[in-house]
Amino acid sequence: MSANNKELVKRFFNEVLTQRKTGVADQIFHSDFVHHSFPVTTKGPQAMKDSVNIFLPAFPDLKAFVEEAIEEGDTVSTKGYWTGTHKGVFMGIPSTGKNVNVKYIDMWKIKDGKLYESWVQMDNAGLMQQLGVIK
């Protein structure tokens, strides 16, 4: 079971984020999925699609990398980073053309073989520094 839960989380990063196969979210996210870390009001797979759609237009070459995945029961935590070039508006910030490398750590709950809940902490200050918004 352990490898399956970890692979499920990695599938999100690899297929949904890096390969932009957002339809995969319908397969791997629970219908009652809740994403606690972004200001989205939807539930289920659409909640993650809404969150992803904040990033992909702004960083169209975004690639996510999972450096480590740890499982405890029905919970998988990962740490890693994502890279991309800021080519579109992100959180009101016009395109800068700058390349970014942003670290993250997250936690996922699995229920009925699907991603059920998630919490994500990204290095937002580092991202804003790389974009030149803050020093």
Image (tube, grey):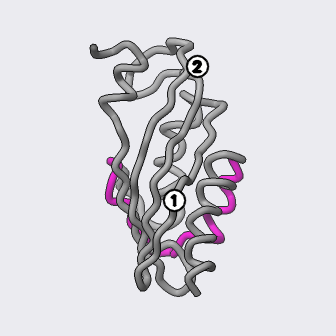
Residue placed most toward the observer, 135 or 97? 135
Identified by mark 2, the residue type is: Lys
Residue placed most toward the observer, 76 or 19? 76
Q: Which of marks 1 and 2 is in front?
A: 1
The structure residue drawn at horizontal position 54% and vertical position 53%, both measured from the top left corner, is 67
x and y percent of residue 3 in the render? 61, 78
Tell me the quadrant of the picture where the C terminus can be found. top left
The residue that label 2 is drawn on is 87
Query: Pointer 1 and pointer 2: residues touching (CB < 8 Å)?
Result: no
Identified by mark 1, the residue type is: Glu
Q: What element carries label 1?
A: strand
The structure residue drawn at horizontal position 65% and vertical position 71%, both measured from the top left corner, is 27
Magenta stretch bounds:
20-39
As displayed, is residue 135 above or below residue 128? above
x and y percent of residue 98 in the render? 53, 15
Q: Residue 68 carries which label?
A: 1
Tell me the quadrant of the picture where the N terminus can be found. bottom right
Residue placed most toward the observer, 118 or 51? 118
Whole-angstrom CA distance, mark 1 to mark 2, is 29 Å
Q: Is residue 131 magenta?
A: no
**Marked residue nearer the N-terminal end (1 or 2):** 1
The structure residue drawn at horizontal position 65% and vertical position 63%, both measured from the top left corner, is 11
